[in-house]
Amino acid sequence: MNTKLLAITFAVTVFSAKVNFAQSVTNQKKWWKEQVVYQIYPRSFKDSDGDGIGDLKGITSKLDYLKTLGVDIVWLSPHFDSPNADNGYDIRDYEKVMAEFGTMKDFDEMLAGLKKRNIKLIIDLVVNHSSDEHKWFQESKSSKRSPYRDYYIWRQGKDGHAPSNWPSFFGGPAWEKAGPDGEYYLHYFAKKQPDLNWENPKLREEVYSIMKFWLDKGVDGFRMDVIPLISKNQQFPDFDSITIQHPEFMYAFGPRLHEYLKEMNSKVLSKYDAMTVGEVFGGTPEKTNLLTDERRKEINLAFSFDVARVGRNNWYQNKWTLPEWKKLFTIQSDLDQYHWPTVFLSNHDNPRTVSKFGDDSPAFRVQSAKLLAMLILMQRGTAFLYQGDEIGMTNYPFTSFSQFDDVEIKGNYKQVLASGVTAEKYLAELNKSGRDHARTPMQWSADKQAGFTTGDKSWLAVNPNYKEINVQNELENPNSVFNFYKQLLAIRKGNNDLIYGSYKDLAPDHNAVFAFTRTGKNNEYLVVLNMSGQKVAFDLDAKFKNYKLVIANQSLEKTTLSSTTLELEPWEALMYKSH
């Protein structure tokens, strides 16, 4: 679900020991380690029927585009039947397609189209909570005697108030009174998203049945929404004044989490060649490592948010330095042979990549978008791209709160202003950090509504820069951001030196240059990135002399490293190869 809650970031899944190449090549080879994932937010990808809402037929119509780009796996954000209190992360029926997106027949046709193009599909598994409109919850709240009562978490009030002082991530308390018995149900997120009770084995079997339904249909795995939250502290103790500011550390990694994941693996995942990646937060690196240790048989991968959310404190974006950021990449890469990292800079819960990490001004948008593509695709780990990053889409210029759709912003607005923050300050910060930046419609052409819909209006406003930044322009320009992504994906595909090779930061303390090597059995690759708007002279070790240029985001003149000093242009990105 949304990373809505991360008040502070935490280190990626690591052990403290440094990894050398001899260790890294002992990683068991898996298809999901070698392929690149492209996330589709269906509401915003492509509308096929003119209602202003993206749908499954729209996705199917663009499968050749994905094949041309060269991605291997699609991660589809929730497509299930939902009243959309939180854009599909509130599920009403897990085995039905959202009416706005189409039908199950449309899903099957999309899946067949992906398979025809040798592209795999993973879908969201949202099982910490459901919609309050799910038939389970409607039965559950009807009576204490309902067989579905224990599918959710109900408690009596305390002294005329909620059972505890637990807060919701979307503002207000995490308890809501409902039903004829006057009890409260728990909801970590919106009150229309009641938390499921994983203590109930019947509920767990329902979840496993849902998983089998989709795996048997042919999907290749799951992105697991807020998975560390499924196990709860059954005492539900009150938080002190400090803890209540960061509830994720109390909510995550409950006492039975590993038991549940091992059972899920044993009963479902072990029967399929499936990929699993968990949205993980609220724990230490050591705790996260336990989830993804291949020997423990729980899940394969974890999304941890240090790199993507560097400097973030909830909705506030603090300043950060390049050395601080590079250190996070090193931590991310330094995993032992039993773990595998994920690499990403954006998703549906974070601002646009080029707006946060690059320079989205007309002068440097293209160069910096290409540089960030090289950075993410040449790292060690499974890379995840988000729709629109491959054409350098930017943040939307919000001018009023009425333009936002995000339930998190709406839920927290009064609370933020009551804390003394001005509306102007809050809006300025949301223009840096808001989730809706990533949710504006995909920009396909310079036609009205960016070619996203044939209708006169889209569900969320199209970025006004769509006439300059769109897929049609990108495909027609051989030097476009899209074609640079395409080249990088082709270089990476099947290249075990780049996939499994070791990672080393060559200049961890440099304030402008991000330089690293990827060293495999056959070749070493050198990547040099000037992450600034100024020219920089960068000195290299003599061992890199005569390395040959593989790809560059600007001039191709630096074909051979004939000098140990590189004169880098603003936002210049270069990759060299040893042989």
Image: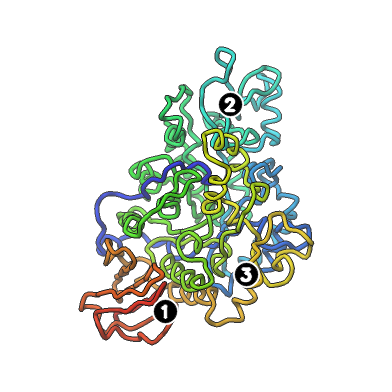
Label 1's element? strand
Q: Earlier in the sequence, mark 1 or mark 2?
A: 2
The residue beneath circle 2 is: 175
The image position of residue 239, as x and y in percent, is 45, 25
Which of the two marks, 2 or 3, is nearer to us in this view? 2
* Picture layout, residue 347 above or below residue 9: below
Q: Residue at x 48, y 33 (%)?
A: 231
How many other residues sit within 10 Å of disc 1, few (<14), some (14-19) or many (≥20)? many
Q: Which amino acid is tagged 3?
A: Lys
Q: Is residue 180 above or below residue 30?
A: above
Report which quarter residue 516 is drawn in.
Answer: bottom left
Q: Which residue is mark 3?
A: 116
- At 51% from the left and 24% from the top, the residue drawn is 165
**Residue 509 in picture, x, y percent from top left:** 27, 61
Cα separation between marks 2 and 3: 47 Å
- The percent position of residue 1, horizontal first and vertical second, equals 56, 46
Front position in the image: 75 or 359 = 359
First in sequence: mark 2 vs mark 3: 3
Q: Nearer the viewer, mark 1 or mark 3?
A: 1
Whole-angstrom CA distance, mark 1 to mark 2, is: 54 Å
